Image: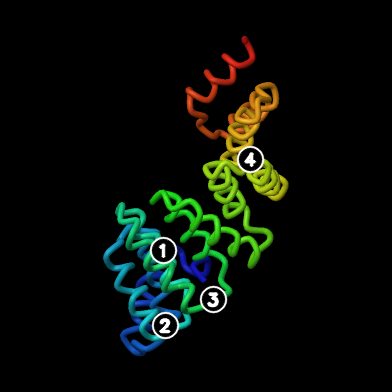
Amino acid sequence: MVQQYENIDDYIAELEGRLSKNDECASSHYNLGVAYLSKRRFEEAQTCFHRAADRSPTMAEAYVQLGGIAMHMGDIEACLRFNQSATKARARFAVPHANIGFCLLQMGQVDEAIKALRKAVKLDSQFVQAYGTLGSALFMAGELDESIEMSTRAVELHPKFGPAWNNLALAWLEKGDAKKAKEFVERAKECNFEVHPGLVADIEAKLAS
């Protein structure tokens, strides 16, 4: 819809005008929230997403957006809660399950993170980021072969997805194959992913030994 307008401010003005006449339209509140986000007007965006969810309790996307704002503000627990609300609003929406997995992983709850991420990729078999995060979680759990499987799936879907190439480097180094690890580090760098210097040093040390 934004493309119809010369700039985002015109789009915001149109939505604000529409809502002044009909405040019960959940989709207009949601669209206005997205427009505010593009202008980094976070508090106003939050208000819009809350209003959208109040008016349409099944609008899981509104809760996901609220979770994204919470994450931006550094409140991972609020991010988790909003995404849990999103799964209650629409259980078969893959995105909040993946976000829940990411939050739990950041909180050190690796096994619970894996469960959420498995659900995300089951619901959406093309969900690149979920496969990538699942690869990370499985690596942290010591499940190296399945970590490699999930990360490989991510790069098959999106060959420029740097985090998954990095996951592959970590897993192969852990399995003792520094040559493969170095190959995957180079692939990660080609995707403009910032590889940790410690990983590079560990690979070089292993190759030199």
Q: Which residue is mark 1?
A: 8
Q: Left or right: where does residue 79 sit relative to residue 170?
A: left
Q: Earlier in the sequence, mark 4 or mark 1?
A: 1
Q: Earlier in the sequence, mark 3 or mark 4?
A: 3
Q: Which residue, as the protein is rendered here, is positioned at the far left?
A: 43
Report the residue at 35% width, 73% height from top: 13
| Alpha carbon separation for disc pair 4 and 1 | 46 Å
Task: Tell me the number on the disc at residue 168.
Answer: none
Coordinates of residue 181 in the picture (x, y in percent): 65, 27
> Looking at the rendered structure, which numbered label has been put on residue 26?
2
The crowding category of the residue bearing disc 4, from other C-alpha atoms within 10 Å (few below 14, some 14 to 19, many at least 20), is many
Nearest the eye: 73 or 39: 73
Q: Secondary structure at mark 2?
A: helix
Which quadrant: the C terminus?
A: top right
Give how far apart the Cα atoms at labels 3 and 4 are.
Answer: 30 Å
Relative to 139, does residue 123 appear above or below in the rendering? below
Q: Nearer the viewer, residue 191 or 63?
A: 63
Disc 4 marks a residue whose amino acid type is: Leu
Q: Nearer the viewer, mark 2 or mark 4?
A: 4
Residue 113: give x, y in percent of width and height.
50, 56
Q: Is residue 88 left or right of residue 203?
A: left
Q: Are marks 3 and 2 in contact (CB under 8 Å)?
A: no
Sequence-wise, which precedes: disc 3 or disc 2? 2
Circles 4 and 1: CB atoms closer than 8 Å: no
Observer-side mark, 3 or 4, equals 4
| The label number, if any, that marks residue 91 in the structure image | 3
